[in-house]
Amino acid sequence: DEEVLFEEEWSQYHSPLGEDLASTDGSAADAAVRQDAVTPCPEVPPLSELVQEEEVHGDISWMVDFAIIGNPKCGTTFLMHWLSRPDDTAVYNGELCSLSHEKPHEVAGTFYDQVTDSGRIALTNEGHRIKGGLKCPKEISTERGLENWSRFFPETKFIISTRHPVEWFQSFYNYHAVGKWPEPVPHPNDLIGACYDESPYLCIDDCEPEERPGNSKLCTDRANFHHSLSRLGKTPMNTPEELQLLDHDMSIVPQKGK
């Protein structure tokens, strides 16, 4: 049935979330056909229906396509600026860590106007959907960050960078030393172990530890990148060797996204 075949082919290029258009040979005529083929774009509800009184009441998952969620001092600022260059991305300029603070409505409010156009999915002149992106390099290490990504943005793709743990600690230590100057930072020997003895997660609120005054983010345990990566549930974690390597008390929050 030619009509059924046409609808099947059309659906793979024109999903409800406004996926990219069909690839062609790139000629001007093809570009015009692609632009006409998706006019009008799918409609989206107004932001007032999705978010009411700082509570999410609708599907906001389509607003953020990718997120840089780890780790600090691992090139995340460079990635943020590099991914901002294409015409089909809308990347928040700075760190947006609202999900760790239980404020998904802030993410929706930030991106709605960036990825929509007059109540419809926004497209570039070439017909590609605008992809929203953000950076929060601590999100993979907080208690609520991954849980809220899984709940509100289950299809978002994560970008996570790492580096040699010793070089990471040296870089992060120097970053804090410069940022806090003229106030002193603890001696490196006093920063071995967890950042906060009462929790395996990165503390995000008022929880400055008494045993390490002036610090709640800088510690050697944050260089255990394999611990935070295991939280994504991408490996079975059912062998003795793996369980021994990944011996931590953080939650495992399997993610659909890549």
Image: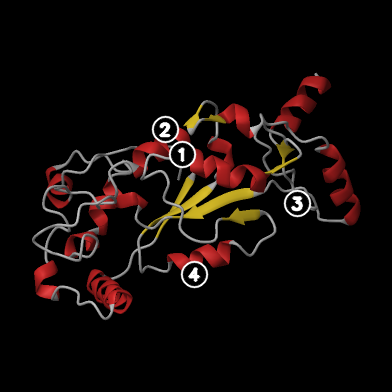
Q: Quadrant of residue 253?
A: top left
- The Cα atoms of the two marked residues, 2 and 4, are separated by 28 Å
Reading the chain from its start, which is encountered first: label 2 or label 4? 4
* Image quarter hosting the C terminus: top left
Q: Residues within 10 Å of mark 3 (few under 14, many from 20)?
A: few
- The Cα atoms of the two marked residues, 3 and 2, are separated by 29 Å
* 190 in relation to 147, above or below: below
- Dot 4 corresponds to which residue? 78
Residue, x 15% and y 64% (percent of image)? 213
Q: Residue 126's spot in the image, x, y percent?
A: 79, 52
Query: Disc 1 vs disc 3: which is toward the camera?
Result: 1
Viewed as shown, does residue 98 lie left or right of 172? right
Q: Residues within 10 Å of mark 2 (few under 14, many from 20)?
A: few
Q: Residue 222's spot in the image, x, y percent?
A: 23, 60
Reading the chain from its start, which is encountered first: label 4 or label 3? 4
- Dot 1 corresponds to which residue? 104
- Dot 2 corresponds to which residue? 151
Callouts 1 and 3 close, C-beta under 8 Å? no
Q: Quadrant of residue 192?
A: bottom left
Of helix, strand and loop, which one carries label 2?
helix
- Dot 3 corresponds to which residue? 124
